[in-house]
Amino acid sequence: MDGNAWRIAGGSALVDGALRQADVLLTEGRLAEAAPGARVLDARGLLVMPGLVDIHGDAHERSLQPRPGIGFPAGMAVRDTAAQLLASGITTAYLGVTLSWEPGLRSLETWRVLMAALDEARPMLALDLRVHLRFEADNLDALDDALSDIATGRVHLLGFNDHTPPILRRMDDAKQVAKYAGRAGVSPEEYQALIGRIAARRGEVPAARERLAAAAHKAGLPMLSHDDATLEDRALYRGYGAGICEFPMSEAVAEDARTHGEAVVMGAPNVVRGGSHLGWASAAPLAERGLVTVLASDYHWPALLAAPFAMARRGRMDLASAWALVSGNPARAAGLTDRGALEPGFRGDVVLVDPVGPEAVAVFCGGRLAHLTAAGAARLQ
């Protein structure tokens, strides 16, 4: 019996865009047409689906800092994050790591520590754990680090963030100032002084964006813009080469992105909860109209697995079509051509789902059995 070969037998597999009973074979890390000497996992009554591809998830921040100001070692946080991702059926994850001018959780210091922890952990991880750099526009002091990490392959997706203007507009609200200061671990007075210094250098932002975009182009990285509020915003970032529109703030922006053939990302929690927690557009109807093409876990890993089932329950999209939003579509948007479907030769990323939960009963990453519940263990033959 070959421990590196598997036959996932008797399940309802998503093949060629439809669910049908079929065995799925894995060997040498890839989906295959034959797998001599394979071990067998009984998938009867389960769905056999391509592994989830999460283009933006930042729930790792709660592993780094479970409570405001209470931090834990980055290595521990990475291990905890990997376990949570696998339990959610996510086999390729882009950690949305914000590199901000604010001190604390999203600071340059935390970025450096987390990058080092990821470098150390990756050889031992089953899932493909990547970095989505969410670069805050005014973080000019961190620009050299960002450029270096892009050039050395530590960054896999570049996101243009610009949250400084809305923060500046809230500086007359003492409650908002206290919230931002608490997140940064400084006093309200220190925070206001800090943002004043940041705003004074606003004129240097366009040149910094140009350098980031040039570095990403040279490294072959996909780029996205975050929270585009206007058509002008989308046009600006499109000009830099950002072909993904993430969390557009209006339907018109999403329509414009789709007109230009761009992927549009919204949050899976939005779908699962039935709407945005911020009162923005509801993702599910936009996905049904083709205006949202990718769902991301955003701030809650398990939502990515639950979202296709929530879409299917609405009755306007079947489960096979909805699964594309969390697997095939994000893979293509990120330029990953070897995953997102159960096709021979593709990377062996497979999730066996009990639809009643839904729950990931077993997860294969690169052909390796990476996660198995007690119910899944009883299915091994």
Image (cartoon, rainbow, N blue to C red):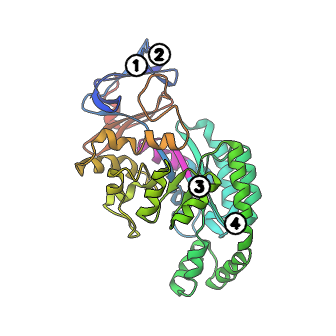
Give whichever of 27, 63 is nearer the camera: 27
Q: Earlier in the sequence, mark 2 or mark 1?
A: 2
The amino acid sitting under disc 2 is: Asp
Can residue 197 be seen in this snapshot?
yes
The nearer-to-camera label among 1 and 3 is 3
Helix, strand or loop at label 3? It is helix
Q: Which residue is mark 1?
A: 39
Contact (Cβ within 8 Å) of mark 2 with mark 1: yes
Question: Would you place residue 14 above or below residue 239 in this image?
Answer: above
The amino acid sitting under disc 3 is: Arg
**Which numbered tag is attached to residue 238?**
3
Q: Which residues are magenta?
A: 79-95
The amino acid sitting under disc 1 is: Arg
Question: Within 10 angstroms of label 2, few (less than 14), some, or many (20 or more) residues?
Answer: few
How far, Cα to Cα, is label 1 from label 3?
48 Å
List the single residue furthest toward the front. Answer: 259
Question: Within 10 angstroms of label 4, few (less than 14), some, or many (20 or more) residues?
Answer: many
Helix, strand or loop at label 2? It is strand
Q: Earlier in the sequence, mark 4 or mark 3?
A: 4
How far, Cα to Cα, is label 3 from label 2?
48 Å
Q: Point out residue 233 in the picture as x, y percentages from the top left corner.
A: 56, 64
Residue 164 located left or right of residue 227: right
Tell me which corner region of the image, top left, top right, bottom left or bottom right, holds residue 190. bottom right
Q: Point out residue 144 in the picture as x, y percentages from the top left corner.
A: 77, 57
Q: Point out residue 26 in the picture as x, y percentages from the top left corner.
A: 44, 22
The amino acid sitting under disc 4 is: Asn
In the rendered image, which quarter contains the N terminus?
top left
Contact (Cβ within 8 Å) of mark 1 with mark 3: no
Helix, strand or loop at label 1? It is strand
Q: Which residue is mark 4?
A: 139
Give whichever of 175, 226 is nearer the camera: 226
Q: Is residue 21 magenta?
A: no
